[in-house]
Image: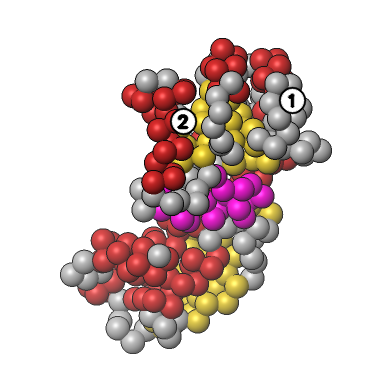
């Protein structure tokens, strides 16, 4: 997946040629460059940068100084590259785009993880990701100390509000889901989103199995009340409107997971640049 992504991204950027470099850089010129960190955060994407170099020009020498997960600050050098100047220029933007985005996500994740430190709650990401970059963004969440929710629509059945409304309610959605799993002989987890204590009571009265209940836009007090009604064998998750100011209150309720879309959907990139060494 990584190799396919890199090849497609290079093709998108270069197409029939890097005309800026072709126009003024000697084809045989050999040079060096360093990745300069320009902001405080958590580094992510080192292995991706290395693989970009390998795929575009295997003669490029990639020398890491730091590693994924390292806490960084302004002025540090993450790695050095040595090789054909044209090759360095060709991979520069793709490396920066990936590493700035991934490092921003890792930094944001580490911040949120720190906010719930000391609780038994696990921080999860969501599917609110950049198309075709989800695997990198979810990897960055792991680097930042978070955990991954489902990767896509295929690896977990997750019955959200629209599913429940389209299916005719909680009972209908779950009964149809149970039939679907049996008919297709699937080994797959089922999560259901609950929007109120009334829906929870309806769910708990049903003779069906499921793995996790997601509580959507519950207040911490209502969440704590809801958790008191649930058997310990059922996983629990809180989601919806949870931010840096409220996440600790939610974690204190005893909920097992908290999913936060802001880890990926609106994160600021970590500032860095690739500087030529003359």
Q: Which residues are magenta?
A: 133-154
Against 181, residue 37 (above or below) is below
Residue 174 lies, with reference to residue 26, above or below; the image says above
Q: What residue lies at 66% left-to-right and 45% top-to-bottom?
A: 110
Q: Horizontal placement of 154 versus 81: left or right? A: left
Name the residue carrying label 2.
174
Judging depth in this view, the residue of 274 and 204 nearest the camera is 204
Snapshot quadrant of residue 234: top right
Q: Position of residue 13 (x, y in %)?
A: 28, 62
Ranked by sequence position, the earlier of labels 2 and 1 is: 2
> Which percent across, then down, holds residue 196?
55, 15
- Regarding mark 1 in the picture, which secondary structure is present there? loop
Q: Which mark is residue 253?
A: 1
Q: Is residue 149 magenta?
A: yes
* SS class, disc 2: helix
Residue 3 within the magenta-colored segment of the rendering? no
Q: Quadrant of the N terminus?
A: bottom left
**Along the viewing direction, whichever of 89 and 135 lies nearer the viewer:** 135
Q: Residue at x 64, y 65 (%)?
A: 67
Nearer the camera: disc 2 or disc 1: 2
Q: Is residue 115 left or right of residue 83?
A: right
> What residue appears at the point 52 percent right and 77 percent down from the top-left corner?
62
Mark 2, Cα crowd under 10 Å, few <14 / some 14-19 / many 20+, is many
Residue 3 appears in the rendering: yes
Residue most toward the top?
198
């Amino acid at each position: 997946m990584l190799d396919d992504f890199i090849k497609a991204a290079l093709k998108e950027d270069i197409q029939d040629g890097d005309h800026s470099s072709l126009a003024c850089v000697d084809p045989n010129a050999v040079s060096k460059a360093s990745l300069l960190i320009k902001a405080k955060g958590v580094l992510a994407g080192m292995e991706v940068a290395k693989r970009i170099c390998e795929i575009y020009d295997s003669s490029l020498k990639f020398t890491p100084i730091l590693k994924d997960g390292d806490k960084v600050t302004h002025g540090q050098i993450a790695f050095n590259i040595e090789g054909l100047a044209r090759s360095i220029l060709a991979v520069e933007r793709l490396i920066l785009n990936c590493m700035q985005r991934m490092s921003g996500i890792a930094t944001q994740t580490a911040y949120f993880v720190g906010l719930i430190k000391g609780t038994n709650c696990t921080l999860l990401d969501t599917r609110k990701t950049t198309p075709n970059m989800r695997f990198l963004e979810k990897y960055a969440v792991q680097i930042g100390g978070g955990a991954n929710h489902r990767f896509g629509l295929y690896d977990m059945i997750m019955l959200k509000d629209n599913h429940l409304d389209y299916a005719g309610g909680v009972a209908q959605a779950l009964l149809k889901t149970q039939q679907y799993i049996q008919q297709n002989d699937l080994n797959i987890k089922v999560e259901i989103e609950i929007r109120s204590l009334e829906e929870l009571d309806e769910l708990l009265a049903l003779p069906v199995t499921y793995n996790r209940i997601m509580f959507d836009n519950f207040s911490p007090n209502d969440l704590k009340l809801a958790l008191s009604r649930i058997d310990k064998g059922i996983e629990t998750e809180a989601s919806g409107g949870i931010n840096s100011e409220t996440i600790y209150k939610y974690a204190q309720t005893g909920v097992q997971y908290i999913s936060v879309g802001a880890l990926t959907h609106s994160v600021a990139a970590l500032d860095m640049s690739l500087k030529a060494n003359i």
